[in-house]
Image (spheres, rainbow, N blue to C red):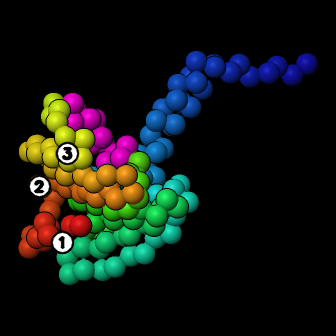
Amino acid sequence: MLRQPRIDLKHISLAVVMSAALLPQMASAALGGPETGVAADAQALKASVKSTDRTTYRVHSIQLASGTVLREYAVAGGTVFAVAWSGPSMPNLRQALGQYFDSYVSGAKARPGSRRHLEIRQSDLVVESGGHMRAFTGRAYLPQELPSGVSLDELH
């Protein structure tokens, strides 16, 4: 009689949970993440993407089904140093801000005030967001990751 191998469900469960926790971060071109995840972002969002090369960086414009445009700014082959959005609805900021989402949430809680405008300035993260229904705009960037010579006016 053949003996069935013993499967340790505890280790399998742990592996599945860890894989699920890491997969979204690996596939995402979120703020601070690798540029290589832009295509995965567009696919996950069921959106189209258009890329434009600038002198020291690349802009990936992702047109969401809602009509909102999410732009991801990345050093070619490197890191996403900024994201910006404009359109009739807010993008999924958890996905767009990636590992910086929790900093955004804590910064937003610390700054009660106008619901139409939010500005968070931390040493490692700046978020500016505003607008009203059907007209939202915003941007988030990593000051320490901005390429030399890039003006903040370019991130819109």
Q: Quadrant of residue 147?
A: bottom left
Q: Quadrant of residue 75?
A: bottom left
Q: Residue furthest front?
A: 133
Which segment is the magenta one? 93-109
Task: From the viewer's side, name the closer residue of 29 and 114.
Answer: 114
Task: Identify the residue shown where x is 38% and y is 69%.
Answer: 61
Are the residues at dot 3 and dot 1 in contact (C-beta closer than 8 Å)? no
Query: Closer to us: mark 2 or mark 3?
Result: 3
Task: From the viewer's side, name the closer residue of 90 and 71.
Answer: 90
Distance from label 2 to label 3 (Cα)?
A: 21 Å
Q: How far across and down, in percent of the image, does residue 60 sit?
A: 36, 70
Per the image, the residue denoted by label 3 is 118
Q: Can the viewer see residue 40 in this picture?
A: no
Per the image, the residue denoted by label 1 is 154
The answer to if 122 sits in the magenta stretch is no
Per the image, the residue denoted by label 2 is 144
Task: Identify the residue shown where x is 21% and y is 36%.
Answer: 108
Majority secondary structure of magenta residues: helix
Q: How far across and down, in percent of the image, does residue 10 sit?
A: 58, 18
- Asked if residue 96 lies left or right of residue 1, the reply is left
Are the residues at dot 2 and dot 3 in contact (C-beta closer than 8 Å)? no
Distance from label 3 to label 1 (Cα)?
A: 20 Å
